[in-house]
Amino acid sequence: MILGIETSCDETSAAVLETPYRLRGHVVSSQDEHSLYGGVVPEIAARAHLRSIDAIVQKTLKDAKCDLNEIDAIGVTVGPGLIGALLVGVSWAKGFAFGLGKPLVPVHHMEGHLFAPSLEDHDAQPPFVALLVSGGHTLLLYTSKWGEYELLGQTRDDAAGEAFDKVSKLLGLGYPGGPMIEQQSVQGCDRRYNFPRPMLKINQNLWDSEYYDFSFSGLKTAVARKVEELDRMGVLEQRISDVAASFQATAVEVLCEKTMRAVEEKQCFRVLLGGGVSANSR
């Protein structure tokens, strides 16, 4: 059995995996402290991980009905992520592995996102096109087999999740931005405002350097200007849902269009979604 540790950002998580598809135990602790700041504060995140990691692992082992001597190896996220947060998980896992005399397996955060869907769907196997969208990353990949990943496109500035968080803060909706924007969008008109669709041009071809890449800073700026305009007009409060819905529709359209380009070019009709933004129901 494998004990997994994850502390790359603002959630402390542990899991016990018995086989590739059998999850024996899984516990996640989210950090509410960051809602006061509208985003993740690295120092606060690291200290919160330090306070909770012992209890999280103990509860995971208890839920899994797993004894320490049944653990065959320890896997831990080594990056990418917040350096202080990662350090807590890696240091804890190294000490635990050394104490038990078990191997330590470093895990790439984004590769973990690729493996996760197979826990629920055993057909989530290569080859596939993968869109990984989170608060820190936006990547479009083609995977021919496990361990071989072709990076097709990535964000050139803000990650998609970061844009959701910042727009949510602009609208006074709180943190985390993804669920807040989605909830507010239900009440709005997603065609009210025609925000720019970054790096999504008509008649782009495969040799265009922007064909698969993403950019969300310009979209975020356009939303900020619209918010300022509506605020000056005294109608911002009545238009918050429309702004949220229009922003969400624009961001999702760009993500979907780029993904479908990869599907067409690779002639691969299995698509995997990973990262927090992929939970958006739109």
Image (tube, rainbow, N blue to C red):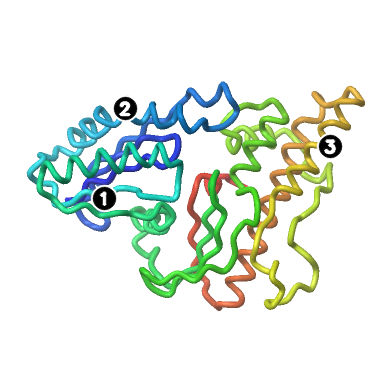
Q: In terms of secondary structure, where does tag 2 sit?
A: helix
For residue 39, side relative to residue 197 (left or right): left
Q: Closer to the N terminus: mark 1 or mark 3?
A: 1
- Amino acid type, label 3: Lys
**Residue 137: x percent and y percent?**
54, 51
- Mark 2 lies on residue: 52
Between marks 2 and 1, how big is the CA–CA gap?
18 Å
- Amino acid type, label 2: Ser
Between marks 1 and 3, how big is the CA–CA gap?
45 Å
When asked about the image quadrant of residue 58, the answer is top left
Between marks 2 and 3, how big is the CA–CA gap?
41 Å
Q: Closer to the N terminus: mark 2 or mark 1?
A: 2
**Residue 241: x percent and y percent?**
75, 32
Residue lying furthest right? 233
Q: Residue at x 84, y 48 (%)?
A: 194
Q: In terms of secondary structure, where does tag 3 sit?
A: helix
Is residue 42 depicted above or below 202 in this figure?
above
When asked about the image quadrant of residue 212, the answer is bottom right
Q: Residue at x 64, y 40 (%)?
A: 164
Q: Closer to the N terminus: mark 2 or mark 3?
A: 2
**Residue 48: x percent and y percent?**
38, 27
Q: Residue at x 73, y 40 (%)?
A: 245
- Mark 3 lies on residue: 226
- Mark 1 lies on residue: 75
Disc 2: CA contacts within 10 A as few (<14), some (14-19) or many (>=20)? some
Is residue 201 depicted above or below 99 in this figure?
below
Disc 1: CA contacts within 10 A as few (<14), some (14-19) or many (>=20)? many
When asked about the image quadrant of residue 189, the answer is top right
Q: In terms of secondary structure, where does tag 1 sit?
A: strand
Q: Are marks 1 and 3 in contact (CB under 8 Å)?
A: no
